[in-house]
């Protein structure tokens, strides 16, 4: 799982080009040929991965994300809270049972979605 916060510095060339740092590409799940979008709002820039061409975008995703964004803005203290200690402990125990996972490894066996 990528870290929750990634901050990298890069330089813009004379042609206005830059290289997206590896840590950022990995956090976004973008590889060679992948597409990213930049959004500038109130002096801040956000970057997000775009679906691969041909992938069907989920029509419910954008409205759901807009709802989450509005909720976080309206109620920041209530909308984001730490996990209860008991739940966090249980998740840690379950993760320890599974062991390290490489998200880039192919999945073996049957997969049901």
Image: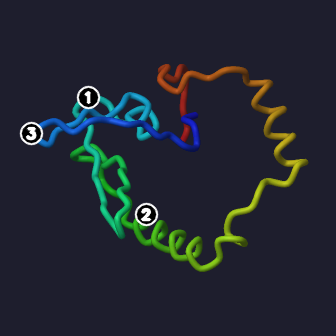
Tell me which residue sits at (44%, 31%) in the image: 23
* Left or right relative to 112: residue 38: left
Q: Tell me if residue 95 comes above or below residue 77 in the rendering.
A: above
Disc 1 crowd, CA 10 A, few/some/many (<14, 14-19, 20+): few
Task: From the image, tell me which residue sits under label 3.
Answer: 15
First-in-chain label (3 vs 1): 3
First-in-chain label (2 vs 3): 3
Label at residue 32: 1
Identify the secondary structure beneath mark 2: helix
The quarter of the displayed image where residue 66 is located? bottom left
Label at residue 90: none
In 3D space, how far apart are the residues under numbered discs 3 and 1 (Cα atoms)?
A: 21 Å
Q: Tell me if residue 12 comes above or below residue 100 in the rendering.
A: below
Task: From the image, tell me which residue sits under label 2.
Answer: 61
Tell me which residue sits at (54%, 69%) in the image: 68
Identify the secondary structure beneath mark 1: loop
Disc 2 versus disc 3: nearer the observer? 3
Q: Tell me if residue 12 comes above or below residue 84 in the rendering.
A: above
> Can you name the residue that lies furthest to the bottom here?
74
The quarter of the displayed image where residue 44 is located? bottom left
Disc 2 crowd, CA 10 A, few/some/many (<14, 14-19, 20+): few
Disc 3 versus disc 1: nearer the observer? 3
Q: Tell me if residue 92 comes above or below residue 36 in the rendering.
A: above
x, y percent for residue 19: 26, 32
First-in-chain label (1 vs 2): 1
* Left or right relative to 2: residue 29: left
x, y percent for residue 90: 85, 40
Tell me which residue sits at (84%, 48%) in the image: 87
* Left or right relative to 108: residue 56: left
Disc 3 crowd, CA 10 A, few/some/many (<14, 14-19, 20+): few
């Amino acid at each position: 799982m990528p870290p929750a916060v990634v901050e990298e510095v890069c330089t813009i060339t004379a042609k206005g080009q830059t290289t997206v740092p590896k840590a950022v590409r990995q956090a976004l799940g973008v590889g060679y040929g992948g597409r990213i979008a930049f959004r500038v709002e109130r002096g801040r820039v956000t970057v997000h991965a775009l679906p691969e061409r041909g992938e069907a975008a989920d029509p419910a995703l954008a409205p759901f994300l807009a709802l989450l964004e509005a909720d976080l803005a309206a109620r920041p203290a209530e909308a984001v809270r730490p996990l209860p200690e008991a739940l966090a402990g249980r998740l840690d125990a379950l993760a320890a049972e599974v062991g390290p996972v490489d998200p880039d490894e192919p999945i073996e066996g049957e997969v049901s979605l």
